[in-house]
Structure formats: structure tokens, C-alpha cells
Amino acid sequence: MTNDELQKLAAALADCGKALLKISETMAVKKDNLPPLEAKSKKAEEPLTLEAVRKVAADKARKGFTAEVRSLIQKYGADKLSGIDAAQYEAFLKELEVIDHAG
């Protein structure tokens, strides 16, 4: 490489560096305006409610998967949705959500 080419490359790298600094500063400002992660994590840790699970189950039943929903409820040892232990809601919901994707 010639000296002229090296100078052009150095100038281009300097421009890239300046652009990266601007991006970094912009991201830092936006980061400061975000709500604290603690608030997000608390929301994610909230336990599932029977109403939330019932909403998904009813939606599946309306889509024609009533027998599958009933079978899944029985798999969890209950005759009706309210008979499922609240500690099992998350696992039940995961299985429930894939019912129409399995076929």
C-alpha cells in the first residue's frame, strides 16, 4: 500500500470510530430512559392465574379442540380446569398452547 492509501484508510477508520461513539452515546441515553429491570422481572415472576389459563383453554375449545383440551385436563388429574393445581398451570399452559400445532 502506498502512503496515500494508508492515509485514506486511516481517515476512514477514524470516521468509523466517530460513528461508533455516536451510536454508543445514543444507546446510553436511551438506556437511561428505560424502566428498571426489576419492574420487568417482577412482572415476569407473577404466577399464572386460573383466568389466564382458562382464556387460552377456551380459545382452543372455540377452535375445535374441545376433546384435546378435556383430555389434557384429565392428564393433569382433574375433571375440570379449576381442579388443576395452580403449581401445574405453567406446564399445562405450555402443552395447551401447542395443541393446534401438533396436527
Image (cartoon, grey):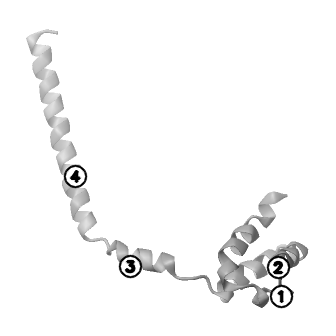
Q: CA distance from mark 1 to mark 3?
A: 34 Å
Q: Give the percent coordinates (x, y) of residue 18.
A: 15, 42
Mark 2 packing: few (<14 Cα in 10 Å), some, or many (20+)?
A: many
Q: CA distance from mark 3 to mark 2?
A: 33 Å
Q: Give the percent coordinates (x, y) of residue 85.
A: 71, 85
Picture layout, residue 77 above or below residue 20: below
Q: What quarter of the picture does the C terminus occupy?
A: bottom right
* Residue linked to disc 4: 24
Residue furthest to the top: 2
Of badges 4 and 1, nearer the viewer stands: 1
Q: Give the percent coordinates (x, y) of residue 16.
A: 20, 37
Amino acid found under the numbered disc labelled 3: Ala
Where on the picture, by quarter, is residue 93?
A: bottom right
Q: CA distance from mark 4 to mark 3?
A: 25 Å
Mark 1 packing: few (<14 Cα in 10 Å), some, or many (20+)?
A: few
Determine whether label 4 and label 3 are within 8 Å by CB.
no
Determine whether label 1 and label 2 are within 8 Å by CB.
yes
Amino acid found under the numbered disc labelled 1: Lys
Amino acid found under the numbered disc labelled 2: Ile
Label 3 residue SS: helix
Picture layout, residue 16 above or below residue 34: above
Q: What quarter of the picture does the N terminus occupy?
A: top left
Mark 3 packing: few (<14 Cα in 10 Å), some, or many (20+)?
A: few
Q: Earlier in the sequence, mark 3 or mark 2?
A: 3
Q: Is 91 placed left or right of 67 in the picture? A: left
* Residue linked to disc 3: 39
Numbered badge on residue 80: 1
* Residue linked to disc 2: 73
Amino acid found under the numbered disc labelled 4: Ser
